[in-house]
Amino acid sequence: MEFNQIETRIDEMKTDEVRCFENEMDLMSISLEAEVSEALYVGMKDFISGNENWDQSKLISSAIANFLFQNGSDDRAVTEKYLNDIFSL
């Protein structure tokens, strides 16, 4: 799926499926596929196995929110995710 297809699908979901919710982005999830180095994979696997409250999805979501926040995102949902994850470790 190309980036513009993802954006189109998000727009469709906003208008059709989650219209009545205040923070629509919290209700949506999008599957991602990415290639990572073996070192990152092993580190992720070790972290998840040592922390019962974390799973692969939560770790990746947290990493993306961390990256976006630290690189200037002013989206409130990103900031909330970033801060919630900092204080839940």
Image: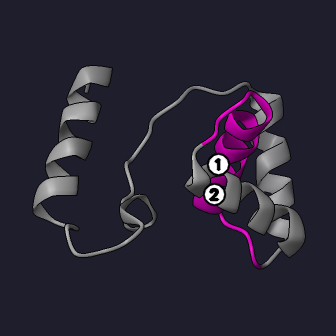
Q: In the image, which residues are magenta?
A: 53-74
Camera-side residue of 41 and 10: 10
Mark 2 is on which residue type? Answer: Gln
Q: Is residue 12 left or right of residue 36?
A: left
Residue 24, compared with residue 2, is above or below; it is below
For label 2, the SS is helix
Q: Is residue 89 visible?
A: no
- Find residue 54 and report its horizontal and vertical position in percent: 73, 69
Q: Which mark is residue 42?
A: none
Q: Residue 56 has which mark? A: 2
Q: Main secondary structure of the magenta part?
A: helix
Name the side, left or right, on which 68 lies relative to 30: right
* Up/down of 49 relative to 37, above or below: below
Residue 17 placement: quadrant: bottom left
Instruction: Out of 76 and 12, give the one closest to the viewer.
Output: 76
Q: Which residue is mark 1?
A: 60
